[in-house]
Image: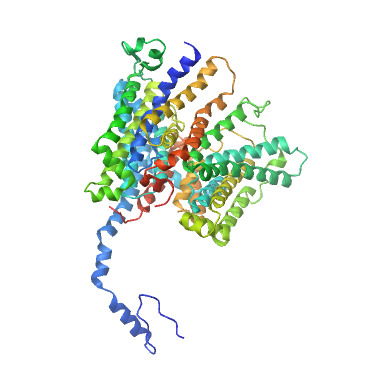
Amino acid sequence: MNGIEQALTTGIEGGTVILFPALGELIGERSGVVNLGTEGCMLAGALGAYAVGATTGSAWIGVLGGLAAGAVLGLAHAWMVVRRRADQLASGLVLWFLAVGITSVLGTSFVSRTVAPLPVVRLPGLGSIPWLGTILFDHDPLVYVSYALVPVVWWVLFRTRVGLVLRATGERPEVVAVAGRRPDLVQLAAVTLGGALGGLGGAQLSVGYVDNWFDNMTNGYGFIAVAVVLFAAWRPLWVLVGSYMFGVALAAASVLQAHNISVNQYLLDSLPYLVTLVALIVFARRGGARTPEGLARALNNTT
Amino acid sequence: MSQTAPIGEPPRATGESAASFAARLAARIDPADVTRRLTSASGWRRLLVALGAYAACLALFSFVVWTQGASPTGVYSSIYHSAITDPGSIAQIFERAVPFVLAALAVTVPARAGLVNVGGEGQLIIGAIAATWVALYLVGPGVPAPLALVLMGVGAMMAGALWAGLAAFLRVTMNANEAVTTLLMNFVANDILLYLLYQPWKDPTGTGQPESMPFGANATLPQVFGNLGVVVALAVAAIVVLVLTKTGWGFALRVVGGNQEAARRAGLPVKRLLVSSMAAGGSLAGLGGMLYLAGTQTQLLPGATATFGYTAFLASFLGRNQPVKVIFAAILFAAIAISAPGLQLVYGLDGNVVDILLALVVVAPLALSGSRRSAY
């Protein structure tokens, strides 16, 4: 396996860690709510999955635990923002902070525990395609779930009535209300679902990608997911591209080291953040006009 | 020309006694209206939500502590002791309040103009890095202490201003959301810090730990009034309050924060104000990083400012971006935060346990902060 192939394979695996939360954040933001607490949802999901996995002995039940932990935090954010009209950015950050504290306290007892990670399944047929088969179809099953999730999210958002109501809520909630729907319930559901997907990303991180739990292990990936959604201009396919770009940047660090190309590890560690920042800067101007109106009010602090 | 009565109050007739005027006013009050307001669903609900939120927060914290085998009441009394009754704690609280107050004001200044600065963490780190560079590589041991310290402070403020100003510049030119860019830049700043400490700035004579060489005596804050950094930080905080509330620049920031379009039409240089507010905030955080470094640590360490910047963001939120309230909120947070080592030592709790408490202090006000009105 050469360096590029390895970087891409690991890049897909690591990109999935961002892809789930980014899709969740996309759903939430399309409904008009930004959740900086995505980072917290991921962290809660990572510990939830690892703790439940270690206790039950099954990484799959652990994944459910991760989903649930993320959903709880997502629901808390949704309640604060939708029901209590709290500041969206502040609420997200507070919940992230809460998650950092709670996970590092509750997580101490799981630091040295082991969980049998999600199995790597090489898909029959597709997996034997030369080169691409290894890169795309030789992963843990959650990666395949994410492949399916991208078109599903796109289809629901842009081709169904549910998606129409969701997007309308993100633009003009009062119009949705006049049409006889409940925009508040739409947002509650969307943000909770987004939190659950954040938790799923955390689960992919702890029981899939690195197979370990340590303090603050998400290391800002949730914030990167939020940035990915911004520069993808709220389009699922571009979220996929952005996530994998991040994943490759993340993988590049370890691959370069394995090939004895000596660059300082910490400079390499900053690569994913720099790549995301540059993408954000380059695409932000273009994406501006696509911002859902309700979301723009929250982001620009004008309510 | 007699003065016109304020709108909504019946004018006091000439020669009418104060008592009769008061009685006339009282007669206008509809008792039914008062009862309705006091017992209105929203009034009670607000109170219930407030009490419920605080109770839930305390319960959650107690639960987390309890799962770790520590007694919740013991933990609460330990925090109370270290924050209030321990005589040695005042100095410690104010020492910690130095970075908290300055990083919290770093959030508040741009927030007045409507910008969200979540980059206090990175700005503290960059300030500390710049101060270290000045202390170890620019001024020699022969430079007198006042000059060396001033140079360190100026360097830290410039570095912080550039680091934060960059995010604001990207916002006004490229429309890159500043909340997200400042957040991501925190992680970059931390990686720069680790790079410097693991390679070029690593103390060759040290214990092998990633840390810089210790500062010389001329680059260390003298211990006058406890710690000179505290005095400087409080003085700077006072200046910030004055600048925000009494100067044209401070007023212009509020106009921009209130309505950017109106500010633009009134001829205010909106973009310049936005960038300058963020740069000013960054310079405050940078100074905070320098003061904490030169006053408390006296050498650059990894994770030195661990989560101080984020804690400061919460403090700024708790103070509702009113500078005086923000300063008090930051000191309150410092009082809570310094109980962490004790909790670690006595109860074996993870040091981050106080983060839970800090977040919970903010959750309840947050749940009450929004406007009661709802469009739908």
Toward the viewer: B107 or B344?
Answer: B107
The residue that appears at 58% across and 32% down in the rendered structure is B192
Toward which corner of the image does residue B4 lie, by quadrant? bottom left
Place of residue A43 in the rendered image (x, y in percent of width and height, measured from the top left): 40, 32
Place of residue B13 in the rendered image (x, y in percent of width and height, measured from the top left): 37, 86
Total numbered labels placed on residues in the image: 0
Q: How is the image coloured?
A: rainbow
**Location of residue B109 with respect to A218 vertically, above or below:** below
Toward the viewer: B105 or A158?
Answer: A158
- Is residue B215 shown to the viewer in this render? no
Residue lying furthest bottom = B15
Q: Is residue A15 left or right of residue B26?
A: right
The residue that appears at 78% across and 39% down in the rendered structure is B142
Q: Is residue B234 left or right of residue B261?
A: right
**Location of residue B209 with respect to A120 vertically, above or below:** below
Q: Is residue B218 left or right of residue A75?
A: right
Residue lying furthest left = A180
Place of residue B32 in the rendered image (x, y in percent of width and height, measured from the top left): 23, 70
**Location of residue B109 with respect to A64 vertically, above or below:** below
**Location of residue B47 with respect to A161 vertically, above or below:** below
- Is residue A190 shown to the viewer in this render? yes
